[in-house]
Each structure stands twice: as structure tokens, then as C-alpha cells.
Image: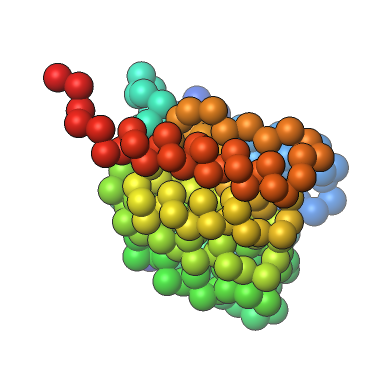
Amino acid sequence: VGLSSVPRAALAAASGDDVQANLAALQDRTMPNEKRAAARTALVNVFWRSGVPVGQEILKAGAAATDDNVRMHVAIILAQTREPLGAGAKAPLTSIIPPELMAPATELLSGWFTRKDADTALRHWAAIALANTMDEKLIPLLKEKALAPGNDEVLRVSVIRALANWRGDAALTVVAPLLVELLGDKDTDVRATACDCLRVAGEDDDAVMEPLLKAAREDPKEPVWRAAIGTLRRLGGGQLDIKPGAPDKERQQVIQNWEIVWGAKKRRPATK
């Protein structure tokens, strides 16, 4: 991945932690799993604090690894996100990968994710890490290799949930249309998760609301239509509650009543 060597003294000054010792623990398959997990957590913490110098060492270790389990631990580190300090609820999550390392990190992760003989857990975490970069250029890869029918259901659902963390224009123009497509998927969990995650749109845009209304009315699986109703209520407001065990006729009437109120509200001039 073309990473330069970072002097050990620079790492120590940046982090105050023994990065190399934790990387060695991560790569030691004879070490108990809980100790390797603790080493991974320590690396995540120091990566957040120190950025590029530590990130370079983590990427170098991942590139040099010959074991998919070690690669998986590196992918888990690279999949981490957090809310920006002091930011509002609508602010996008921040990837642990700094901009300076985004290109080599996504190259490494894409290689792991697309490798046909890769371990399932490695592919899973690599895909989540790629989605968590919030890089629009990666959407075609994720759509083809992770979200397409026939791929592992757990992987598909996990990537959908990662995409739900996007914010801003890309959430409405890139992610939302992709999730709308998945409302017609054959898999119930995929449809339900897509309905739930369409909250990523952040507003009651017709391009999102109409497909959600269709799912709420017509999907035969209760987890799907209930997820659609929850997102409609979240984006459009108002009272939209259907009691457990309610007959279909009641569901249709409640949805129709809500849609009338929502439509009137949409047409109403903004209050000055």
C-alpha cells in the first residue's frame, strides 16, 4: 500500500502507548482472544488520538499479515466511527481513517473484501469499514459485491445499517435511492432493514415517502411494514400507530388517514 516507515520515537511521542506491542499481540494467535481484543481496543483508542502515525503502522501490519484472522482485527479497527466532538445529531459520523490514509486504507480493504477465498468474517468487517468511510466512489462496489441478491444476508444487513449513518446530500441522493431499490428484495430482513434505515434521508422527500407508503400498505411481512411505518412516522411526524394483531383493514385505514394529514401538511404554506 506504499506506506512510509514511521520512527518508533515518533509513535511513542504521539501516543504514549506501545503501539508495536499491541500490534504484536494482535498478530499472536497463541494469545487468548480476550487479550487480543484488548490490544485491538488499545490500538483503536491511540489511533483516534494520534491519527496518521499510528494509522500507518496499523495499515502496514494489515498489509503484511498472512492470516485472515489478523486481517479481520485490522478491518475491525478501520471500521470504527464516532460522532464529531461538539457536533449536532445530524452531523455525519467520522471514520477513524484520516483523509491522508483513506486511499491506501480503502485499497487494502477492497482487496480483502473482493478476494474470493477470504474468510467470511474478514469480508464482513472489510465491507462495513468501506461503508463507514462514507466515500461515494465505493457505492458501486458495495452494491455489486455486498448488497446484491445472493450475497450473505448478515453481510447485506450490516452494510445497509452502516450506510444509514451517512448524512448530508449523499444520504438523500446516493444512499436513499439504493435503499429504495432494496424494498423490493426477496429477503424479509433486507427489506425491513432498508425500511428502517431510510431514515437516513433526513426529510420527508416524496422519493422516499412514496416507496415507504407502498411497503407499509402492501408488504405481506409484518416486520417490513412495521419498519416502514416507523420510518414514515419519524420523517413525516403525526400519529401513525397500528396495534399488534390489528386486521389488515384497520392497518390500511390508519395509513390512509395518516397520508391525508401528511399530504395536507406538505401542501400547506410555510409559517412566516
Q: Residue at x 34, y 47 (%)?
A: 205
Q: Residue at x 69, y 42 (%)?
A: 250
Position in image of residue 114 (x %, y %): 56, 75
| Image quarter (top left, top right, bottom left or bottom right) of the N terminus | bottom left
Looking at this view, is 187 or 247 the one in front? 247
Judged from this view, the residue extending furthest toward the bottom is: 116
Query: Front-most of 265 and 143?
Result: 265
Q: Is residue 137 visible?
A: yes
Q: Position of residue 246 (x, y in %)?
A: 77, 40
Instruction: Please provide percent x and percent y for residue 69.
Output: 72, 59
Name the residue: 37% across, 56% down: 207
| Residue 44 shows in this picture | no
**Scheme of colours in the image:** rainbow
Number of dots carrying numbers: 0
Q: Position of residue 31 (x, y in %)?
A: 82, 45
Q: Nearer the viewer, residue 104 or 94?
A: 94
Q: Nearer the viewer, residue 68 or 5?
A: 68
Among the 4 quarters of the image, the one containing residue 42: top right
Which image quarter is the C terminus in?
top left
For residue 31, above or below residue 244: below
Q: Is residue 103 above or below residue 80?
A: below
Q: Residue at x 58, y 47 (%)?
A: 228
